[in-house]
Image: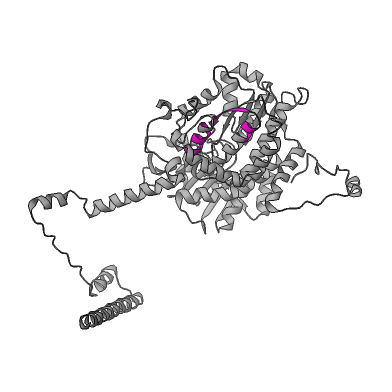
Amino acid sequence: MTDCVEEAKLEVKQASKEFKESENVAEKYSAMTGTNMNVGELSAAFTAVPTHKSMKKQIQFANQEEKQEFSKFPTKTGRRSLSRSISQSSTDSYSSAASYTDSSDDETSPREKSQVNSKGSSDFCVKNIKQAEFGRREIEIAEQDMSALISLRKRAQGEKPLAGAKVVGCTHITAQTAVLIETLVALGAQCRWTACNIYSTQNEVAAALAESGVSVFAWKGESEDDFWWCIDRCVNMEGWQANMILDDGGDLTHWVYKKYPSVFKKVRGIVEESVTGVHRLYQLSKAGKLCVPAMNVNDSVTKQKFDNLYCCRESILDGLKRTTDVMFGGKQVVVCGYGEVGKGCCSALKALGAIVCVTEIDPICALQACMDGFRVLKLNEVVRQMDMIITCTGNKNVVTREHLDRMKNGCIVCNMGHSNTEIDVASLRTPELTWERVRSQVDHVIWPDGKRVILLAEGRLLNLSCSTVPSFVLSITATTQALALIELYNAPESRYKQDVYLLPKKMDEYVASLHLPNFDAHLTELSDEQAKYMGLNKNGPFKPNYYRY
């Protein structure tokens, strides 16, 4: 008992001594902050403070064999590395984002693998079919926030409005688009699918789709050659010919038009959801080469006002944070383009304290930016001062090599438009510039003088290449796409000519109404008198086609 008391007294005495020494350190530091001490004096002052030296005990070995055996174990540095690798692998085992989408453990190209799903089918090409179980879990999570699309699936499943439809699709392959694909299958369609972006595919989701029987050809990190090979595998299938196209960007439509003109002429309709793809369709139409009706989903109200605006408002921040860990407060940012995507980006960045300016070609959008409190300038006027440059125009060469040469060290450059043509990345692949991979989707481009520009996703779509997007807002777009396919597939031949059409207003309103229950929203109904006074049908549509929301 006496020994315990003595030990306790020694511990209290030792703690008291350490406390006084820490006080001495604090006093010395506070005294130094009030004087002009140089670094040498500062270092000397701290080394003068007494510290406890750790006692290194020599390990005693019974014989030489034991000593040799001990030497086989990792050193202190080695143990730390080993610990980190074990910790990392443990994390990867449970994190789908780290393990399944970004995994680079298996460098073998999926094109060189022979894979079969549980049904015995090999008509697919994904990174690893064994990841299907994890992909299924992610799809189930997405379904929880895509209740409107699930509701459409349940309402129309009995009718099978897409029975006989053979849909070839080229979109981002994520958990959210998987819900769309499986909805189309439930409505009677046969689907073959590929990715519209070489970086946005979630490998585990692609595996889950392949396991369910969808012929999917996609994996994260495809080469350009892989990209076109996957599209061709989707289209060129013996005994199977597509009669509907669902596209995002126009690459699939372009490939079928150029390589398989006989297939293209027999297609009953095209549904396109991006600015770039719609632009290509209008070019074909103007040239008289569009021989099938096409639905412009991109300019539908439910796509423009929800996916483009609200989705980008959240996902721009997610993509930048995941890739660069940047703090937005006080940063100088230029957003090129003030359409719906640009509006969403500017709103989010401004809310977090960034100093945002805008570039625009359209005087109406430019005036909107001014009224929202943003300066509208030319890129070459501000490029030297910017910490971040974000493109969202859908155009090409918005950021040129001349702009890139003038950027300051550490400037972050990224793209929120669909196409990878907005930033002139090709001009950076020259002998005098060095590319340094920092992490997945993040590169330092280093100039001869040591200046570094941080390029994200090699100029491709930031939010889907480097992060994810909200399931709810994608439910709106996916429901719109599904209805557009149903409309084109079932419409009488005389309803749509060989041209590009906007989704009927009634469909836009129906898509919106399907999502209102998520917010427990209750619509006010017009009385007969009110409907007559406004010249409206009580059930809609409630706005003319020319109305700007």
Residue 152 position in % (x across, y down):
68, 39
Q: Is residue 281 visible?
A: yes
Camera-nearest residue between 359 and 10: 10
Residue extending farthest front: 1
- What stretch of residues is rendered in magenta? 183-210
Tag count in the figure?
0
Residue 32 position in % (x across, y down):
32, 76
Q: Is residue 360 magenta?
A: no
Residue 25 position in % (x across, y down):
30, 76
Camera-nearest residue between 400 and 347: 347
Q: Give above or below for 165 relative to 143.
A: above
Residue 87 position in % (x across, y down):
35, 51
Q: Left or right? Give the position of 403 relative to 510.
A: left
Camera-nearest residue between 295 and 394: 295
Residue 149 placement: quadrant = top right
Residue extending farthest left: 63
Q: Is residue 192 magenta?
A: yes
Q: Left or right? Give the position of 314 relative to 364.
A: left
Quarter the N terminus occupies: bottom left
The residue shown at (68%, 41%) is: 151
The residue shown at (52%, 59%) is: 329
